[in-house]
Image: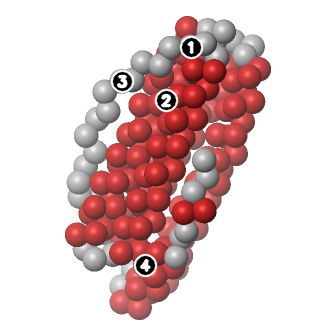
Amino acid sequence: MISEKLQDAINEQIKYELYSAYMYLAMSADCSDRNLTGFEHWMRLQAQEEIEHAMRFYDFLLERGGRVELQAIDKPPFEFGSPLEIMEQSLEHERFVTSRINGLYDLAQAEQDRPAQIMLQWFVTEQVEEEASIDEIVQRMKMFGTDGAALFMLDRDLEARGPEEVEA
């Protein structure tokens, strides 16, 4: 059985994963309003991925005999600025999530909960990939600019992201 302290921390993480989905969905809608269909598509897939992450935590708690207690999710913003600002905010948010995952891992170590450590190792690896993926987009935007052809080409590249790239 999982400790109450770790159970509570995972329940809180479920909230943050669902907030992440909510935020990416809001970003998707903002991009849709600007006819940035590639950004819209990328953000929508990102939202789906975050829901899958929340469900990993949810299922883990149930498998360990824990209790899932869903918490209120804050309303995300609905306007995010330029496409570059959107991606920078995404990167900043993923760094925040990484810090939360690292804190959960530290707690699992302190609680000597090996199953939680193993489960959280997947998230540690996933967060490295998330940050690298978004940082690459940010760096490309800074290098090639965000006007005209460069933005058009990046938008088209982001639209090519397939659902198989969403990790469960």
The CA span between labels 2 and 1 is: 14 Å
Q: State the residue position of label 3.
A: 71
Q: Nearer the viewer, residue 4 or 69?
A: 69
Total marks shown come to 4
Asked if 53 appears above or below 38 in the picture, the reply is above
Tell me the CA gap for discs 4 and 1: 42 Å
Under circle 3, the secondary element is: loop
First of labels 3, 4 by sequence position: 3
Q: Which percent across, then down, holds residue 85?
A: 36, 63
Name the front one of labels 2 and 1.
1
* Residue at 25% across, 40% down: 75
Look at the numbered disc 4 and give the secondary structure of its residue: helix
- For the residues labelled 2 and 4, the Cα–Cα distance comes to 31 Å
Of badges 4 and 1, nearer the viewer stands 1
Q: Do the residues labelled 2 and 1 touch (CB within 8 Å)?
A: no
First of labels 2, 1 by sequence position:
2
Residue found at x 50% / y 14%: 67
Q: Which of marks 2 and 3 is nearer the N terminus?
A: 2
